[in-house]
């Protein structure tokens, strides 16, 4: 079971001066067994053992010296060995695109992002087309938005757009026929949707 979900914008409790943050398109799922799953929306997904999850959690929450001391204390380990392990893991996570130096992460331009995404979502919903075609375009827009602006900004804008359309959505959400038709449209669109990234690999 998932215990916590961390992103670049919600890194968890930060202690001291953290030098690294999760990359914008990375979602870290912390599980109850203390292992973790890393979902890189650029295309990678992998599991972390309990020890690797512990190291990554400290890397994004505090500075290397504090992290080494905290881990060494928890596991009754030699702090110098822990510091070496942290350095190796940090370089590995940087190479994999899981983390980035904190100073290189630019603040999200939410107003501009919101304006562009809201406009595109509105265009898709104004299309006079079948639910399947509309779902297909929404999937494509989601893919492009996540690649361009990242997962957190995309989700915020998506939620805001549909919150603004809340009255219409609330009325339809209670109609089983509409729910079934929407589910069928999404399934159909997903089955025939080609991920644009396939052509670049």
Image: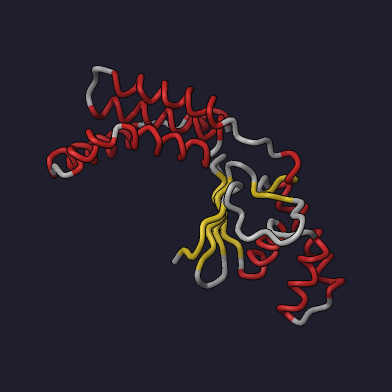
Q: Could you say where residue 167 lies in the image, as x and y percent from the top left?
A: 24, 35
Q: Hey, which quadrant is residue 50 in on the image?
A: bottom right
Of 44 and 28, nearer the camera is: 28
Of 21 and 200, nearer the camera is: 21
Q: How is the image coloured?
A: secondary structure
Q: Could you say where residue 88 lies in the image, as x and y percent from the top left?
A: 79, 59
User: For the C terminus, which image quadrant?
Assistant: top right
110 displayed left or right of 171? right
141 displayed left or right of 64? left
Of 89 and 102, nearer the camera is: 102
Of 65 and 91, nearer the camera is: 65
Vertical position of residue 16 compared to residue 8: above or below:
below
Seen at 83% across and 64% down, the residue is 65
Q: Could you say where residue 74 lies in the image, as x and y percent from the top left?
A: 71, 78
Seen at 55% across and 58% down, the residue is 37
Seen at 28% across and 39% down, the residue is 187
Q: Hey, which quadrant is residue 54 in on the image?
A: bottom right
Seen at 57% across and 39% down, the residue is 42
Q: Hey, which quadrant is residue 184 in on the image?
A: top left
User: For the N terminus, which image quadrant?
Assistant: bottom left
Residue sitting at the far bottom: 76
Vertical position of residue 182 compared to residue 144: above or below:
below
């Amino acid at each position: 079971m998932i215990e916590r979900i961390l992103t670049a914008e919600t890194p968890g409790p930060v202690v001291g001066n953290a030098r690294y943050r999760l990359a914008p398109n990375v979602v870290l799922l912390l599980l109850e067994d203390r292992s973790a799953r890393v979902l890189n929306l650029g295309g990678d997904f992998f599991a972390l053992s309990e020890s690797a999850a512990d190291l990554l959690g400290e890397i994004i929450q505090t500075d290397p010296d504090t992290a080494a001391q905290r881990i060494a204390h928890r596991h009754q380990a030699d702090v110098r060995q822990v510091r070496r392990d942290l350095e190796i893991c940090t370089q590995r996570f940087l190479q994999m695109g899981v983390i980035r130096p904190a100073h290189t992460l630019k603040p999200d331009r939410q107003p501009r992002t919101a304006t562009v995404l809201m406009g595109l979502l509105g265009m898709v919903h104004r299309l006079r087309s079948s639910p399947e075609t509309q779902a297909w375009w929404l999937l494509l827009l989601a893919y492009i938005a996540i690649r361009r602006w990242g997962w957190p900004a995309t989700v915020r804008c998506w939620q805001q757009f549909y919150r603004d359309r809340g009255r219409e959505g609330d009325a339809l959400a209670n109609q089983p026929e509409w729910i079934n038709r929407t589910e069928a449209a999404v399934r159909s669109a997903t089955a025939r949707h080609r991920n644009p990234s396939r052509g670049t690999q």
